[in-house]
Image (cartoon, rainbow, N blue to C red):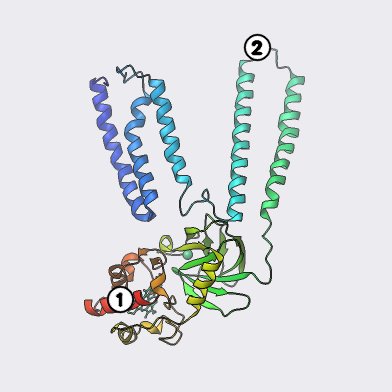
Amino acid sequence: MISTSSSYQAFLTLKRLWGILPLCFSITGAADSGTQRQEVQYITLFQMRFIVPLHLFPHKFSLKSGVHNATLLRLMIGVITASLLGGCTGVQSTFSTFGVEAEATRKLIVVMVVAGVLITVGVGWLAVHAVRAPPGQLDHARGTQVILWLGAIGPTVLLTVLLAASLPMMKTLPVGADDLEIAVDGKQFWWRVRYLPPDGQATETANEIRIPVGRTVSFTLASSDVLHSFWIPGLAGKVDMIPGRRNKLVVHATKAGTYRGVCAEFCGLSHARMAFDVIAMQPADFDQWLANVAGHAAAVSGPGRQLFEDYGCNGCHAVRGHFTISSIGPDLTHFGSRLSLAASALPMTVSTIKSFIRNPAIAKPGALMPAFESMPTEDADAIATYLMELK
Ligand code: HEC
Ligand SMILES: [Cu+2]
C-alpha cells in the first residue's frame, strides 16, 4: 500500500489534472495517425504518466508493501523503453525496413547513435575525472597532451572513420535499362502514378504504389504545383518533388508486405492527408497485377456509370474504357482495387466514398475537387457502388 498523506493526495490530484492534457494530445494523435499501432502507443504512453511520477519520488511516497523502489524503478524504465521501442516497427517506420536503401540508413543511424553515446560517456567520464583529480595532478603539460590527443587527433580520426562508414551509403543503386520506372507526380493533395515498364505501355493510376520484390525500381519524381516530398520510410530516404525538375530515386524492395508512404514537405492545408499505400509484391504477382491495371475498366451494370457522366465527374477523372481520358483528377480506372480512399485519408467503403463525393473538404480541407452537396443519396450510392466495381 502507498502512504496516504495529505501531500500525497494533493500530488495525486495534480497528477490527474496533468493527465488530461496528454489525453487530448493522444486522442488527436490517434485520429491523425490512422494506424492502430500508433493509437496503442499513444495510449500506453498516456497511461505511463500515471505510474511514472509516483515512483520517482521514493522518499516522499514510501511504499510499504516491501517491494523495493529500485526494483519498481527498473521495471518502469523497462516498460517505458519497451513501449518506446514499440514505435520502431510498423507500416511507416524507418526501423522496420523492406528495402536496401532504408536498411543502409537504419544501420548508419545505429552506428552513429552508438558512437555518439560512447563519446558522450567518455567525455562525461573525463569531466568527472578532471573535477575529482587532486590539485596539482593535472599540470599544464598533461593538459596540453589531453587537448592534443582528445581534442584534435581523436576527433579527427573518429570523424574520418564515421565519414568513411557513411559515404558509401550516399551512392545511388545502379539501374539497368530493363528496370521498371515509375513516374510519380505530387499534386495538391494526391499522387499521380505512372508505370513505365521498359517494353510495355505506360499505365496511369493514383494514390497507391505497387512494386516488385527483388527487382530494382527507379522513381522519377516531379511536381506540377508546389513543393512536395516523396517518402516511403521503410523503403528509402525522402526525395523532394520540385516543380520544373525531375528527381530520381532508385529502390530495391527486399520484403513483401503492405506499407505506407507520405508527403514529407508542407504543401498546403491537406498536406498531412497526402499519403499512399505501398504494396511490395512477389514479382510474378506484380506482373499479373500490372497487366490487369494496364487494361480497361471492368464492365459494370447499374446506373452509376451514367450518373458519373451526368454529374460531370468524367470532366476531371479518367476511367479508361468508359470515359475519354481527362487527367485533372486521379485516374479511377481500377479505383475499386485501391486499399484506401483519397490518398490514404479515408478507409475504402461505400459510405466514405459517398461522403467524400458530397463534401471532399470534410476529410481534406483545400482539396481541389468540387463538392456535390446537393447530390441525392440514391445518386451518391449508385456512383459509389460504380466506383467500387472498378477493380
Ligand atoms: C474539377 C475536377 C473534379 C471533378 C469535377 C470531380 N473530381 Fe473527384 N477529384 C478531383 C481531385 C483534384 C481529386 C483529388 C483530391 C485529393 O485527394 O486531394 C479527386 C478525388 C476523387 C476521388 C478519390 C480518388 C482516390 O484515388 O482515392 C474520388 C473517388 C472522386 N474524386 C470521385 C469523383 C466523383 C464521383 C465526381 C463527380 C460526382 C468527381 N470526383 C468530380 C477532381 C475532381
Ligand atoms: Cu504534398
Q: How far across and how far down the image is residue 40, in percent?
A: 36, 46
Residue wearing tag 1: 385
Q: CA distance from mark 1 to mark 2?
A: 83 Å
**The label number, if any, that marks residue 105 in the structure image:** none
Q: Is residue 193 visible?
A: no
- Quadrant location, the C terminus: bottom left
Residue 161 visible within the image: yes
- Percent x, y for residue 98? 54, 55
The image position of residue 358, as x and y in percent, is: 28, 74
Q: 44 above or below 27?
A: above
351 or 59: which is nearer to us? 351
Q: Is residue 250 left or right of residue 37?
A: right
Mark 2 = which residue? 134
Crowdedness near tag 2: few (<14), some (14–19) or many (≥20) residues, C-alpha within 10 Å: few
Element marked by disc 2: loop
Apparent side of residue 232 relative to residue 138 in the rendered image (left or right) = left
x then y, percent, for residue 61? 31, 21
Work out whether 74 lies above or below 327. above
Indicate the quadrant containing the N terminus: top left, top right, bottom left or bottom right: top left
- What's the residue at 39%, 49% (across, down)? 37
Contact? badges 1 and 2 (CB < 8 Å): no
- Mark 1, Cα crowd under 10 Å, few <14 / some 14-19 / many 20+, is many
| Amino acid type, mark 2 | Pro
In the image, 179: left or right of 17? right
Q: Residue at left 70%, top 13%? A: 137
Secondary structure of the residue carrying numbered label 1: helix
